[in-house]
């Protein structure tokens, strides 16, 4: 089967998407081939802090450093998305866009988060849409050099191609600045503007609730 989209790229949920897992989501599509596809949500802080996710680490982790929701599949595992120099355990998605499980990347992420919090004197707030634990400085500090992604989005053979054909997703060219230098709360709208799609388009609701995600 010939795929309709080449990875890596960004997948942008259409305005009509009603699946809670992907409503107004922007995904980094890391792999797409004849066997299926894997991607990671970029714009959804998790309700669980980084400290709660890796409490076994022998160091102090500020409670305000977030973990990120990567997708609905295998939410007991995590991987770090980063733009730092690669390590031997990294997978390079594109130049300057890497996935890692390396301990030194985790340490660097914690140090960066601690320094950012100190510099901006921010703390957790409850968002207006009741998605908890987002940083109050999201508008003034839009750089995300690290994301601790919990879970991922997975598609079986031909599934993503069918979803794209049905109008569930739009494809946006991969841009490193969109991944790391754009406020997560603005990312979906910025991608929609780049593609040229308005909220009034594609009014028919789209749900992926019954799709058989990879396990």
Image (cartoon, rainbow, N blue to C red):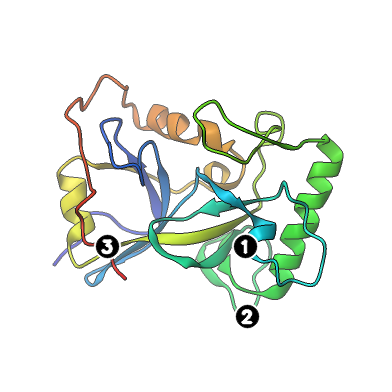
Question: 55 or 207: which is nearer to us?
Answer: 55
Distance (Cα) linking label 3 and label 1: 23 Å
Tell me whether circle 3 and circle 2 mark residues in contact (CB < 8 Å).
Answer: no
Extreme residue toward the bottom, this view:
88
Please give left or right for residue 70 compared with residue 11 in the image: right
For the residue pair 211 and 168, the one nearer the viewer reads as 211
Give left or right: position of 38 versus 147.
left
Marks 1 and 2, how far apart at CA: 24 Å
- What's the residue at 66%, 57% (across, down)? 50
Helix, strand or loop at label 2? It is: loop
Q: CA distance from mark 3 to mark 2?
A: 30 Å
Q: Looking at the image, how many numbered discs can be counted on the residues?
A: 3
Q: Residue at x 23, y 66 (%)?
A: 156
Q: Is residue 59 left or right of residue 165?
A: right
Query: The residue tagged with tag 1: helix, strand or loop?
Result: helix
Front disc: 1 or 2: 1
- The answer to whether residue 20 is left or right of residue 59 is left
Q: Secondary structure at mark 3?
A: loop
Q: Quadrant of residue 127?
A: top right
In the rendered view, tell whether residue 14 sits above or below residue 31: above
Residue marked by disc 1: 53
The vertical placement of 3 against 201, above or below, is below
User: Which badge, 3 or 2, comes first in the chain's sequence?
Assistant: 2
Residue marked by disc 3: 213
Rendered-image quadrant of the N terminus? bottom left
Residue drawn 66% across the image and 29% down it: 139
Crowding at dot 2, Cα within 10 Å, few <14 / some 14-19 / many 20+, comes out as: few
Check the image and report above or below for 33 versus 165. Answer: below
Say which residue label 2 marks: 88
């Amino acid at each position: 089967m010939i795929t309709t989209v080449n990875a890596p790229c960004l997948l942008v949920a259409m305005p009509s998407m009603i699946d809670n897992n992907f409503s107004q989501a922007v995904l980094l599509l890391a792999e797409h081939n004849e066997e299926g596809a894997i991607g990671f949500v970029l714009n959804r802080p998790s309700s669980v802090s980084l400290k709660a996710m890796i409490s076994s680490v022998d160091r102090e982790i500020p409670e305000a450093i977030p973990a990120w929701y990567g997708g609905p599949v295998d939410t007991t595992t995590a991987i770090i998305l980063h733009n730092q120099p690669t390590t031997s355990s990294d997978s390079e998605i594109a130049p300057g866009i890497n996935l890692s499980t390396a301990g030194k990347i985790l340490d660097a992420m914690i140090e960066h988060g601690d320094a950012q919090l100190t510099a901006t004197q921010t703390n957790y707030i409850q968002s207006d849409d009741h998605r908890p634990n987002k940083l109050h400085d999201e508008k003034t500090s839009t750089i995300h050099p690290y994301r601790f992604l919990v879970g991922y989005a997975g598609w079986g053979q031909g599934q993503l191609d069918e979803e794209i054909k049905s109008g569930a997703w739009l494809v946006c060219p991969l841009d490193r600045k969109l991944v790391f230098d754009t406020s997560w709360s603005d990312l979906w709208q910025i991608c929609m503007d780049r593609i040229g799609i308005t909220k009034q388009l594609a009014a028919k609701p789209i749900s992926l609730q019954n799709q058989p995600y990879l396990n």
